[in-house]
């Protein structure tokens, strides 16, 4: 009985392929954590407002992230 090893199998387990999958999983996890954060949703809601609505709140579009995450920066 012989075992056939294809190029696809070898490339799947190459160190670079494993590193790429690992980094991709880490990045995806970080994005999921960030999106679950209530501050992310606040930024999204403020970004969806018009410039006039932001001005009524005393904000400029460029200041949204600093306004939401200001105490962390």
Image: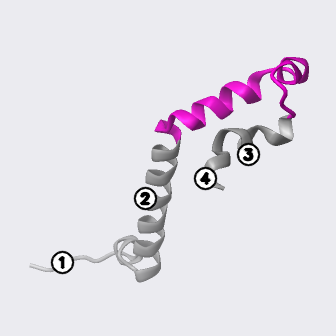
The numbered disc on residue 25 is 2
The reply to whether the magenta stretch includes residue 55 is yes
Mark 2 falls on what kind of element?
helix
Q: Is residue 72 left or right of residue 36?
A: right
State how far apart marks 3 and 2 are (Cα). Answer: 28 Å
Q: In which image quadrant can residue 10 be found? A: bottom left
Q: In which image quadrant can residue 49 be found? A: top right
Mark 1 falls on what kind of element?
loop
Closest to the observer, 40 or 22: 40
What secondary structure is the magenta-colored segment mainly? Answer: helix
Q: Is residue 36 left or right of residue 51?
A: left
Q: Position of residue 6 (x, y in %)?
A: 34, 75
Which residues are drawn in magenta?
35-60
Labelled pair 3, 1 in contact (Cβ < 8 Å): no
- Disc 1 marks which residue? 3
Say whether disc 2 or disc 4 marks the residue closer to the N-terminus: 2
Say whether disc 2 or disc 1 marks the residue closer to the N-terminus: 1
Residue under the point 86% across and 18% down: 56
Labelled pair 4, 1 in contact (Cβ < 8 Å): no
Task: Name the front one of labels 3 and 1.
Answer: 3
Say whether disc 4 or disc 3 marks the residue closer to the N-terminus: 3
Mark 3 falls on what kind of element?
helix
Q: Position of residue 37 (x, y in %)?
A: 49, 38
Labelled pair 2, 4 in contact (Cβ < 8 Å): no
Task: Name the front one of labels 3 and 2.
Answer: 3
State how far apart marks 3 and 1 are (Cα). Answer: 59 Å
Residue under the point 67% across and 30% down: 44
The residue carrying pointer 2 sits among few (fewer than 14), some (14 to 19) or many (20 or more) residues within 10 Å by Cα, namely: few
Closest to the observer, 47 or 16: 47
The numbered disc on residue 72 is 4
Q: In which image quadrant can residue 11 be found? A: bottom left
- Disc 3 marks which residue? 66
């Amino acid at each position: 009985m012989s075992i056939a090893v294809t190029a696809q199998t070898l490339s799947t387990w190459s160190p670079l392929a494993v590193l790429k999958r690992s980094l991709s999983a880490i990045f995806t996890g970080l994005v999921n954590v960030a999106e679950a954060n209530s501050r992310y949703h606040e930024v999204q809601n403020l970004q969806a407002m018009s410039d006039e609505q932001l001005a009524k709140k005393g904000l400029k579009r460029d200041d949204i992230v600093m306004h939401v995450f200001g105490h962390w920066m």
